[in-house]
Amino acid sequence: MPSPTTVSDLTPRERGSVLPPGELRLLGLFENVRRRGPWVVEPRTLVRAVFSDVVLDLREAMVPGQCVIDVGAYLAEVKIIVPPELHVTMDVTTVIAEAKEKRRGEPPSADPTAAAIHVTGTACLAEVKVVVRRHDES
């Protein structure tokens, strides 16, 4: 059987696994997910955590301009570790949950062309937190 060359050549099951360009999906379902070291943050990253912990360490990651990290956390913890120079905004709906940014020291650059992430989504009986750490901190 020949290899598919277009999306329409894929079976329905294969079609469901094709992500739109510029999108990354991470799922922690009763297990932990870690993303550390050098990696590319897509313009839209979907994180789903159910009874699990998800850690995204962006200190060595390539953040291309403006990115959205959309979080769905249910009885879970999502921690996003960012370097001090990365600008972060948060708009997370909480239901018996907590969403916070822990930043100490100087705020990030106000340069509108600098890389930035916008954390959105929902947390239910969960915690979504952005923690600022220098590259040399563990």
Image (cartoon, rainbow, N blue to C red):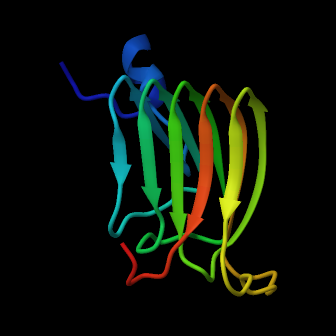
Q: Residue furthest left?
A: 1
Most foreground residue, 53 or 104: 104
Most foreground residue, 78 or 15: 78
Q: Does residue 69 lie above or below 95 as drawn? A: below
Specify the quadrant that holds the N terminus.
top left
Residue at 51% in and 39% down:
77
Q: Does residue 78 lie above or below 43 as drawn? A: above
The answer to whether residue 95 is seen in the rendering is: yes
Q: Does residue 54 lie above or below 13 as drawn? A: below
Specify the quadrant that holds the C terminus.
bottom left
Could you tell me how many numbered marks the image carries? 0
Residue at 46% in and 29% down:
7
Residue at 81% in and 85% down:
110
The answer to whether residue 18 is left or right of residue 125 is left
The answer to whether residue 11 is seen in the rendering is: no
Q: Quadrant of residue 63?
A: bottom right
Residue at 45% in and 32% down:
18
Most foreground residue, 110 or 115: 110
The answer to whether residue 81 is left or right of residue 93 is left
x, y (%) of residue 125?
Answer: 63, 25
